[in-house]
């Protein structure tokens, strides 16, 4: 089975309870992600439209209750699962989808590598995103300087980075999660940790 077909099959068969299996502590992980969607870079305001590309089962929506959320995923099974939980979700590929009207923020988590052409994707998203594009980035897989250059070429003049240390596959006590979140702001120590693990959350926008 070819890699794209294998991935498609993985999402099709695993859509049910996807987030519950992907995240050891979904509430801790997704609530922090949602907080950064709202606060990193230009602030979002209640009622703003948020587009979540490659949304999976749409679990992020419940942590963004102040905003108008639309999830897009290329897997029909994921879209069905999101809708089963009351999430506004549509079928679409992040490379081609464009909302019917502009959105304040577009987010893309654990999926930036699905862009066929990264600069083209950033340019496409810039055309319908009014305030910011928010995504996660593994700095051991992609050079921040390269991402910054691609964003500038697409019209996003500024890039703000925040280390994201809440673990995906390990559930920790609340005190430990709070300590990790505090460590995200530790400057040089946080950047050193990113050489070995963890990711950035990025907010690209214009001045």
Image (spheres, helix red, strand yellow):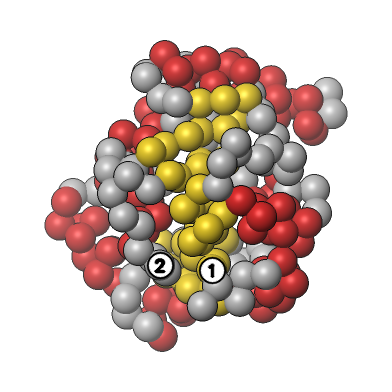
Q: Nearer the viewer, residue 177 or 86?
A: 86
Q: Residue furthest bottom?
A: 188
Does 165 sit left or right of 78 as displayed? left
Question: At 74% across and 40% down in the image, what residue appears?
Answer: 96
Above or below, 196 against 50 in this view is below
Q: Nearer the viewer, residue 114 or 134?
A: 134
Above or below, 122 against 151 in this view is above
Q: Which residue is mark 1?
A: 205
Q: Secondary structure at mark 1?
A: strand
Above or below, 88 against 177 in this view is above
Q: Quadrant of residue 35?
A: bottom left
| Number of marks in the rendered image | 2
Q: How dense is the environment of label 1, judged by Cα within 10 Å: few (below 14), some, or many (20 and up)?
A: many
Above or below, 116 against 56 in this view is below
Question: At 24% across and 56% down in the image, what residue appears?
Answer: 177
Does 157 sit left or right of 80 as displayed? right
Structural distance between the alpha carbons of marks 1 and 2: 8 Å
Q: Quadrant of residue 140?
A: bottom right
Coordinates of residue 27 in the picture (x, y in percent): 28, 40
- CB within 8 Å, label 1 to label 2: yes
Ranked by sequence position, the earlier of labels 1 and 2 is: 2
Coordinates of residue 148 in the picture (x, y in percent): 65, 74
Q: How dense is the environment of label 2, judged by Cα within 10 Å: few (below 14), some, or many (20 and up)?
A: some
Q: Residue furthest left?
A: 175
Question: At 34% across and 70% down in the image, what residue appears?
Answer: 184
Coordinates of residue 9 in the picture (x, y in percent): 69, 20
Q: Secondary structure at mark 2?
A: loop
Coordinates of residue 54 in the picture (x, y in percent): 58, 37
- The mark found on residue 42 in the picture is 2
Whether residue 147 can be seen here: no
Question: At 56% across and 54% down in the image, what residue appears?
Answer: 129
Q: Residue furthest right?
A: 2
């Amino acid at each position: 089975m070819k890699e794209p077909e294998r991935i498609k099959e993985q999402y099709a068969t695993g859509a049910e309870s996807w987030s519950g299996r992907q995240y050891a502590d979904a509430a801790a992980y997704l609530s922090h992600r949602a907080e950064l969607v709202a606060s990193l870079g230009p602030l979002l305001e209640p009622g703003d439209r948020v587009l979540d590309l490659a949304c999976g089962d749409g679990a992020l929506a419940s942590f963004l209750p102040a905003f108008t959320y639309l999830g897009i995923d290329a897997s029909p099974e994921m879209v069905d699962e999101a809708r089963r939980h009351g999430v506004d979700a549509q079928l679409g590929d992040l490379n081609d989808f464009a909302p019917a009207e502009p959105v304040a923020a577009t987010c893309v988590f654990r999926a930036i590598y699905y862009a066929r052409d990264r600069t083209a994707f950033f340019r496409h998203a810039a055309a319908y995103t009014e305030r910011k594009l928010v995504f996660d980035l593994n700095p051991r897989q992609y050079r921040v300087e390269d991402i910054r250059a691609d964003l500038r070429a697409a019209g996003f003049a500024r890039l703000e980075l925040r280390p994201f240390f809440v673990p995906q596959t390990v559930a920790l006590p609340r005190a430990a999660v709070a300590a990790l979140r505090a460590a995200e702001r530790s400057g040089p120590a946080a950047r050193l940790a990113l050489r070995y693990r963890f990711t950035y959350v990025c907010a690209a926008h214009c001045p």
